[in-house]
Image (cartoon, grey):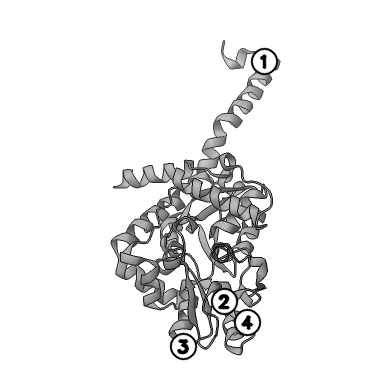
Amino acid sequence: MPIATLPRRAILRLAALSLVLGAFSGAPALAQDAKPEVIRIGSTAPGHLKFILFRNQKLLEKEFERDGIRIELTTFDGGSAASVALGSGAIDFTYIGNNPSLRLGASGADVKAIGLSSWIPSNETLVVVRPDSPVRSLAELKGKRVAYLSGTVRHSTFAKALGDVGVSINDVESLNIGIENSGPALARGDVDAIVESTGPAQKLVDAGAARVLFDAATAGKPEWAVPYLISVNGDFARTYPRIVERLLKVDIETARWADAHPDETVAIFVKETGNSESAVRSTYAQGKFYQNPEITPQAIEALKGEERFMAETGLLKGKVDYDTWIDRSFYQAAAAQVTASN
C-alpha cells in the first residue's frame, strides 16, 4: 500500500521506526565522518622521538591539512602532568613514559593505551654526581640528597638500581626537582646526585659539570626496560575513531622512516633537543630506534611487571585492567592502511 494511503497513526509509527533505525545505522557513519577542529598532543619535554619528528617535519599537519584540522604539540615537564591533562580532556593524545601511563590506567580514567611510543632496550637513565664527588657507587648514596622528578621512569629505574645493591630508595633524601634546577643545584653542592634521562645528563658530563655514577644502559638489567606508551582520551577516541587511526598511520610511517634514515633522524633529534650527538647515538645504538607502535604480548607482560614493581614500592595506587585499558583495534586499522598504501 502506498504510504500516502496509510492511516495517519501508521505513518507516525513508520516515521518513529525510521528515526530509531537511523540512529543505530547512522551512528558509525557519523563517527567516521566527524572531525575535530584541533588535535592536541602532549609529550614529556623535550618530546619523544616520533613527537619530535612530527614537529620538525610537520607530518601531522600534512596529514590533516586537507581536513582543516589544526595540530597542537605541547611538552610537559613530566609525564604526570601530561597524563592529568589527558585524563581531563585538556589534550587528546600523549606520548609519555610507562609509569605515568600506568598510574592513569590504574586510576580508572577514561583513557586508552593504543600504541607504543618506543621500547628502547637501553633504559635511558643516568645517575650523575659532581666530578669531585667522593661518591663512587650507588650504595654510597645512602643518606645523600638526590634530585629527580618523582613518578617518572627514572624514579622507577633508580629505585630498582638501588635495590640491586641493597639500598632502599627511602634511604636517600629524594628531592623532586627537574633538570633545569637540579643541574645548577648539583654545581652549587645543594644536591649530591641527579637521576635524569641520558640526553640532559650527558650534556652536564660533556660540559665537565658532572661524572657518571651509574648508566642503566650498561649496568642495568634488560627487564628494567619497559615500553613508553601512546594514549588517547576515551571520549576523543569514541567520537573520532578514524582520526585516531590516521594518526597511528602517520606514527607507523614515521617509525619506518626513522629506521630507513638513521643519520637524518639523529641530526633532527640533536637539533630539536640540544642533546649531544654522542649521547643520542648511544641511546639509539647501531641506528636502531625501536619506535614500532604495535602493542605486542611481550610489551604487555613488561608493563605488568612494571605495574607490580610500582605497587610494591608505593608508586602506584589501584590496579590496571588491561582488557579495557589497551585497545589494539586502532593500530590494526592503521597498519592495514599502511599496507594498502604500499
> How far apart in space, not on screen, are marks 4 and 1 (Cα)?
81 Å
> Which of the pair 51/37 is nearer the observer?
51
> Which residue is label 2 attached to?
194
Q: Evaluate if marks 1 and 2 touch, with contact meaning CB atoms under 8 Å apart.
A: no
For label 1, the residue is: 10
Label 2 to label 4, Cα distance in Å? 8 Å
Camera-side residue of 215 and 235: 215
**The N terminus appears in which quarter of the rendering?**
top right
Q: Is residue 38 visible?
A: no
- Number of the front mark, 4 or 1: 4
Quarter of the image for residue 260 reads: bottom left
Q: Residue at x 52, y 75 (%)?
A: 137
Q: Amino acid at mark 4?
A: Val
Classed neighbour count for the residue bearing mark 3: other residues with Cα under 10 Å, few (<14), some (14–19), many (≥20): few
Q: Mark 3 highlights which residue?
A: 208
Query: Pointers 2 and 4 in contact (CB under 8 A)?
Result: yes
Type of the residue with mark 2: Ile
- The residue indicated by pointer 4 is 191
**Amino acid, disc 3:** Gly
**Which circle's residue, 3 or 2, is located before the other in the chain?**
2
SS state under label 1: helix
In space, the residues marked 3 and 1 are separated at their CA atoms by 86 Å
Callout 1 amino acid: Ala
